[in-house]
């Protein structure tokens, strides 16, 4: 029996997938950008070899699909070479989006847990509220976001809160579903045992249901924190915001700056990965303290 290897079992598969993605990406860079190179050469009465066409597809200022190195250069320039207070800095825009994300995530977490507790302990809420919670997620967020922004602006509420509420709208759902499942996960024998001990409903909740729901809660939080970021970005699009990752995407689309768009997308993906990683770390620490294997 072969011994486990960190490189072979975990690192090598990841590197293989990344390499395959990069190869496919470079192929599509040439395929999508080549028509513009040929058209430009034809207007200049210039004949290009295949190698020259390939070379120019990787250095276009406004390519259909940017090359990976162009995105890397843009990321370096807008994160390292720009002051974080500059409106051209992706760090600045990421912080604007992050503030709305965290506020919406916090509100969504509290709301989701409270709704889940009510649904589990009240049969009327279970039958009446749960279907509406599910139905709320059938409405496209792109249709809801402008309405929320317009209504809140009409009553004088602007800034971070409208974007945070859109994040809340997306993030509370996985928490409700996960916590309902978690709070109902204790075995019937354990619930009967608590009744045998004459435990009150509060004691049963805090000593049995709540600890049993922790794995479900943190799994839901990982989904919720990522979707909160999506909500914050979507909330910046219909407002014509001047700051935030959504604003960078919007301005890039207005002026055909595809490299800027892709850099903002990679920044958003990296930010989501960090947030999910933080929740995952907290997940492991909490379960370890509880004596449960994650």
Image (cartoon, grey):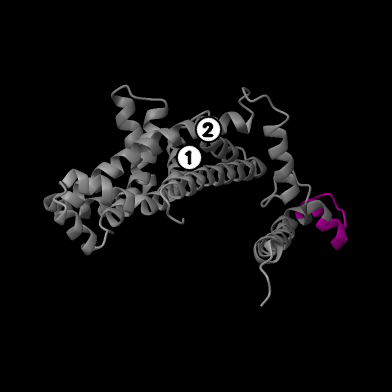
Q: Which mark is residue 233?
A: 1
Instruction: Please identify the quarter of the rendering in which residue 254 is found.
Output: top right
Relative to residue 30, is residue 214 depicted above or below? above
The answer to whether residue 137 is visible is: no
Q: Main secondary structure of the magenta part?
A: helix
Q: Which image quarter is the N terminus in?
A: bottom right
* Residue shown at 16% from the left, 47% from the top: 201
Q: Where is residue 126 drawn, in percent x and y?
A: 17, 53
Which residue in the structure is indicated by mark 2? 244
Q: Is residue 207 left or right of residue 145?
A: left
Q: Is residue 282 visible?
A: yes
- Label 2: how many Cα within 10 Å (few below 14, some 14–19, many 20+): many
Task: Give the residues drawn in magenta, as a range.
Answer: 39-54
Label 1–label 2 contact, CB within 8 A: yes
Which residue is at the front of the view, 270 or 35? 270
Q: Is residue 215 above or below residue 50?
A: above
User: Which residue does the image show at 46% across and 35% down from the upper left?
Assistant: 236
Question: Residue 194 location, x and y as percent?
Answer: 19, 54
Is residue 49 located in the magenta-colored stretch of the structure?
A: yes
Q: CA distance from mark 1 to mark 2?
A: 7 Å
Secondary element type, mark 2: loop
């Amino acid at each position: 029996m072969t011994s486990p290897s960190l490189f072979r079992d975990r690192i090598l598969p990841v590197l293989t997938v990344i390499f395959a993605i990069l190869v496919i990406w470079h192929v599509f860079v040439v395929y999508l950008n080549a028509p513009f190179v040929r058209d430009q050469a034809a207007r200049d009465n210039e004949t290009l070899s295949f190698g020259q066409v390939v070379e120019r597809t990787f250095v276009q200022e406004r390519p259909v699909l940017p090359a990976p190195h162009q995105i890397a250069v843009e990321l370096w320039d807008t994160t390292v070479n720009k002051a974080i207070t500059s409106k051209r800095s992706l760090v600045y825009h990421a912080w604007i989006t992050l503030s709305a994300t965290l506020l919406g995530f916090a509100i969504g977490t509290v709301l989701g847990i409270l709704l889940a507790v009510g649904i589990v302990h009240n049969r009327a809420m279970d039958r009446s509220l749960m279907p509406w919670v599910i139905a709320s997620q059938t409405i496209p967020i792109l249709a809801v976001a402008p309405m929320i922004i317009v209504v809140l602006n009409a009553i004088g509420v602007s800034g971070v809160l409208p974007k945070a509420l859109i994040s809340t709208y997306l993030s509370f759902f996985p928490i409700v579903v996960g916590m309902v499942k978690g709070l109902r996960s204790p075995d019937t024998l354990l619930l009967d045992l608590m009744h045998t001990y004459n435990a009150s409903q509060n004691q049963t909740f805090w000593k049995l249901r709540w600890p049993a729901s922790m794995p479900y809660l943190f799994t839901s939080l990982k989904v919720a924190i990522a979707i909160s970021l999506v909500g914050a970005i979507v909330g910046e699009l219909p407002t014509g915001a001047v700051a935030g990752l959504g604003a960078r995407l919007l301005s890039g689309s207005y002026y055909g700056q595809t490299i800027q768009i892709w850099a903002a997308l990679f920044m958003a993906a990296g930010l989501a990965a960090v947030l999910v990683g933080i929740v995952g770390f907290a997940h492991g620490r909490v379960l370890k303290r509880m004596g449960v294997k994650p």
